[in-house]
Structure formats: C-alpha cells, structure tokens
Image: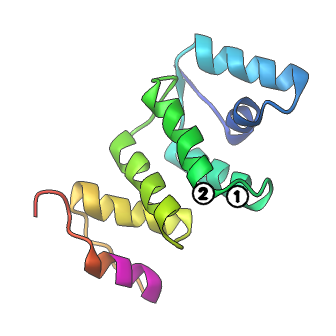
Amino acid sequence: MSLVDANVVLRYLLDDHADLSAKAAEMIERQSATLPMEVACEVVYVLQKVYAVERKEIQRQLGSLLDETQVSMEKPAVFLKGLECYSESGLDFVDALLLAYHLVESESVFTFDDKLNKYLRRAAPRGE
C-alpha cells in the first residue's frame, strides 16, 4: 500500500497532463493507494481555489474515489460526511471536517469561529 500526495490525486481527477495523469491513473486504479486526510484537505483546497471546481463537484469526485474503493483512507465516514457538510454549507473544508467529526464520532469541538459554532449547535451527533 502506498500513500498518495495531492499532485497524484489532482492529476488523476483533472486528467490534465498526458504523462502524469496516466501515471496517476495507474497508481490509483491498479495498486493499493491510501489518501491521508491531510492530503485530501489540500486536494479540496486546490480544486476550489486554483481550479474553481464547485463544491458539489468536489464532493462527487472525491466521494467516488472512496465509494469505488480506488483509495483507502482512515476514517472514511468522517471524510465523506465532511464532503457533504462542505458541499451544503459555506464552511471551509477543515471546518466541515470538524463538524463531521462531531456528527459521526460525537466529538466535542471547541472553536472561536462563530460560523462553525452555529453549525455545531444545530447538529446532533449520530445516535442522539
């Protein structure tokens, strides 16, 4: 199993470089690849800020990587919930992940961010 970095995932999703995109596809589709949560955060940021990809499309693309088991990840349920929260809110992705930890794993989140606190107050963790 190999860890993949943001550039590999971006080349795969964007299919924008003949050589590197093909190598990324080979790595992701034919080998066991693990996407660290930190790298996933970078991918979301770059897709949104550099490539102007819409939030729903980011959710669809990254969600399909996990749904099709092309890549593995620690805490995939948290990540997928984070993508959902991100696509349906104005939260940045890291704040959406914090909300997802609260919702999926009933984690308490301490923040000074008023916007995130608003979402946390309205959210009920799983099982409540």
Q: In this view, does 2 lie above or below 54?
A: above
Q: Which mark's residue is nearer the viewer, 2 or 1? A: 2
Dot placed on the residue nearer the N-terminal end, 2 or 1: 1
> Identity of the amino acid at label 1?
Gln
Alpha carbon distance from label 2 to label 1: 7 Å
Residue 80 position, x and y percent, is 41, 46
Q: Could you tell me which quadrant the C terminus lies in?
A: bottom left
Amino acid, disc 2: Arg
Q: Nearer the viewer, residue 87 or 120?
A: 87
Residue 65 position, x and y percent, is 53, 31
| Residue drawn where x is 89% and y is 22% of the image | 18
Q: Identify the element where label 2 is drawn.
A: helix
Q: Main secondary structure of the magenta part?
A: helix
- Residue 22: say if magenta: no
Is 54 situated above or below 33?
Answer: below
- Disc 2 designates what residue? 55
First to last magenta residue range: 114-119
Against 87, is 109 above or below? below
Q: Is residue 84 placed above or below 6 in the rendered structure?
A: below
Asked if marks 2 and 1 touch (Cβ < 8 Å), the reply is yes
Q: Is residue 25 left or right of residue 2?
A: right
Give x and y (percent) for residue 4: 63, 31
Q: Which residue is drawn at 67% across and 57% down?
A: 45
